[in-house]
Image (cartoon, rainbow, N blue to C red):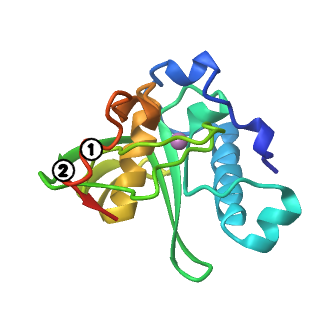
Amino acid sequence: MLKTKDILDEKNKLLRTISEEVKFPLTDKDKETIQLMVEYLTNSQIDELATKYNLRPGMGMAAIQLGIKKRYIVIVHEIEEEVFNTYVVINPKIVSSSEEKIYVEDGEGCLSVNRETIGIVPRCARVTVEGFNIDGEKIKIRAREELAIVFQHEIDHLNGILFTDHIDNKNPFKYKDLYRAI
Ligand code: NI
């Protein structure tokens, strides 16, 4: 079982590296890691389990957050009370995105950023992501709103980018009225 302390903190330089394309078939180790990521993210969004196992709630995780320099991400999206859609995408790529921009009103969060942050992170309201499932089959996902933001956030991780990089420190709320809050 993954523990919160297994997730790298933003101070760790590995989070700034560009992850490498994954070749198929996946190794047993990567399959196992993916299972652990799914389990962590799911449990972390169930209050009782999050408390029991001391998990920080999170919707998404990239392999590099566990120190693995490979291009895969896991997203566990709660669609209704404790009902989750799980996305595992290997070599994900954003193939199209909306002009419209949105941002999380309460601010974005990240399992690797263990401090309060303020400011707006502009994100595309809709994205289409292509990649592969664990069996190496091509998949395409259309995501909007919160889910679209999580995909952009996780794919950023594969390129060494953290959400805090998108915040304008001199004027953290400059996009407040320009873009739509969700
Ligand atoms: Ni993150």
Q: Residue at x 49, y 51 (%)?
A: 135
Q: Quadrant of residue 81?
A: bottom right
How far across and down, in percent of the image, does residue 24 sit? 48, 37
Residue under label 1, please give it: 94
In the depicted view, which residue is nearer to us: 88 or 60? 60
Q: Residue furthest right?
A: 52
Q: Residue furthest bottom?
A: 81
Residue type highlighted by circle 2? Ser
Residue 165 seen by the camera: yes
Label 1 environment density (alpha carbons within 10 Å; few <14, some 14–19, many ≥20): some
Q: Is residue 82 above or below residue 128?
A: below
How far across and down, in percent of the image, does residue 64 sit? 57, 31
Q: Assess whether mark 2 and mark 1 are in contact (beta carbons under 8 angstroms).
A: yes
Residue 137 seen by the camera: no
Relative to 109, 44 lies left or right: right
Front disc: 1 or 2? 2
Residue under label 2, please give it: 97
Q: Residue at x 32, y 64 (%)?
A: 145
Tell me the SS state at disc 1. Answer: strand
Q: Is residue 6 above or below residue 81?
A: above
In the depicted view, which residue is nearer to us: 120 or 57? 120
Tell me the SS state at disc 2. Answer: strand
In the depicted view, which residue is nearer to us: 111 or 94? 111
Residue type highlighted by circle 1? Ile
Specify whether tag 2 is near ligand 1 (CB below 8 Å): no
Q: Residue at x 35, y 44 (%)?
A: 121
Q: Residue at x 39, y 58 (%)?
A: 105
Q: Quadrant of residue 143?
A: bottom left
Label 2 environment density (alpha carbons within 10 Å; few <14, some 14–19, many ≥20): some
How far across and down, in percent of the image, does residue 12 sit? 64, 20
